[in-house]
Image (cartoon, rainbow, N blue to C red):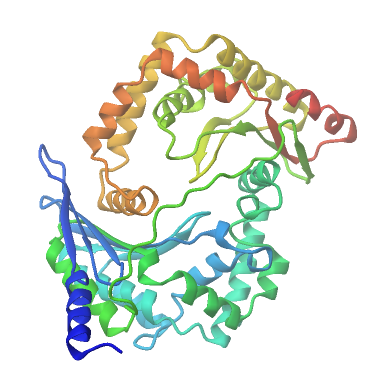
Amino acid sequence: MTSRGSKATARTSTEARAVARTQTLIKGEHGIGTVRKTTLPGGLRIVTETLPSVRSATFGIWAHVGSRDETPALNGATHYLEHLLFKGTRKRSALDISSAVDAVGGEMNAFTAKEYTCYYARVLDTDLPLAIDVVCDMLTGSLIREEDVDVERGAILEEIAMTEDDAGDCVHDLFAHTMFGDNALGRPVLGTVDTVNALTADRIRRFYKKHYDPTHLVVAAAGNVDHNKVVRQVRAAFEKAGAFRDPVAEPLAPRDGRRTIRAAGRVELIGRKTEQAHVILGMPGLARSDERRWAMGVLNTALGGGMSSRLFQEVREKRGLAYSVYSYTSGFADCGLFGVYAGCRPSQVHEVLKICRDELDHVAEHGLTDDEIGRAIGQLRGSTVLGVEDTGALMNRIGKSELCWGEQMSVDDMLARIASVTPDDVRAVARDVLGRRPSLSVIGPLKDKQASRLHDAVA
């Protein structure tokens, strides 16, 4: 039996732990914003970057859920839920949600990825309280009614059809499947026609309840914002909705683990009557937490990140074999991808693939020149700064950083990390990543003889 005094002591201890914890992560100077973070009782994190010199603000809520959290039967549920949160709450209809932001000249949207989902609104700084109220209401008070699920199903099926009509987009889904197979990272974010048709309101509601707990969420705001005011408004909105169920709950930690990528040398072809053949030649890359990612960014930029890159020069400028050719990296919590994309006439697929494979093999064996590395570092530093020059990009950076890494890095720190990359760093990561046997994904009208030769590119 517990005495009255013991109960009082336990309650006091709980209340002492259930307080908001605020810290300054980055002190603004030289025109860079100040980043602050508050963790509320109940595990909700709020991160802001304050830039008094601008007149706008972007407010977003990041959910620690993406398509990789779905079972095969739930494929597409995360994206479906993203649509449904715009369909109405206990306070607002779908029209009320959209018209509230439209009436102040703002913009509101959302996106779903493999490891997270984000809902955001960009408004004038004076209208930030409205944006906070609307977005928080959507995240905490969605009704997910049967009739809305049925109506939105049609819109999502049209979105899937639109994606499948764009072979240049669809080939990236195919490449994910080529590399990861039939597991969560290998399945499309949108789901398939069959899985979307099978999803019910009840199953989506359970998915919503499981993954939209405050411990799974990060609130991010950037622009002319006052951190303490944002915290008060967000806290009031979540408390009013009864979202905090456990006052001493801790935020969900960033993802970890190890994902196994399928064996190299795989080839997947989807025959389709398109004017171009769309190809991705690639191999396993680096996880987003890998310290070599800075060197990998320089390597990727030099290989296929701009008009002066090797692939652009060899494939387009010198030979005119493709209009679009580039390389890219995708980093997940426990693995990554590196890929080279090109769109070309079907008759030129094998020539394009040979050039790309030869360049990858050459760089893996001999590395890049010092001039190429220096130019890539300059390009990457410039694009890093230019990429965070608006409040929406700033909100994305601080929100994603908190959700995925649990920490913040200033722009100056990022520029310093890029500048510290040495030619030996780039050559080492080139040997490790580009030296692996690639796999290949192709969508296009290839004839049997052409298709049979695709394995040459990954031999």
Q: Residue at (36%, 47%) from the top-left corner?
A: 405
**305 left or right of 131 in image:** right
Q: Is residue 127 at all visible to an observer of this figure?
A: no
Q: Say if 93 sits above or below 393 in the image.
A: below
- In the rendered image, the residue lying farthest to the right is 448
Q: Residue at (27%, 45%) from the top-left corner?
A: 408
Q: Say if 116 sits above or below 346 in the image.
A: below
Quadrant for the C terminus, please. Answer: top right
Q: Quadrant of residue 67?
A: bottom right
**220 left or right of 259 in image:** left
Quadrant for the N terminus, please. Answer: bottom left
- Where's residue 232, x and y in %? 16, 72
Q: Say if 97 sits above or below 250 in the image.
A: below
Q: Nearer the viewer, residue 295 or 132?
A: 295
- Where's residue 344, x and y in %? 67, 31
Q: For the image shown, how many numbered marks are present on the structure?
A: 0
Q: Is residue 328 at all visible to an observer of this figure?
A: yes
Q: Say if 216 sits above or below 94 in the image.
A: above
- Where's residue 433, x and y in %? 56, 25
Q: Residue at (37%, 78%) from the top-left corner?
A: 140
- In the rendered image, the residue lying farthest to the front is 1
**49 left or right of 439 in image:** left
- Where's residue 44, x and y in %? 30, 67
Q: Residue at (68%, 25%) from the top-left corner?
A: 437
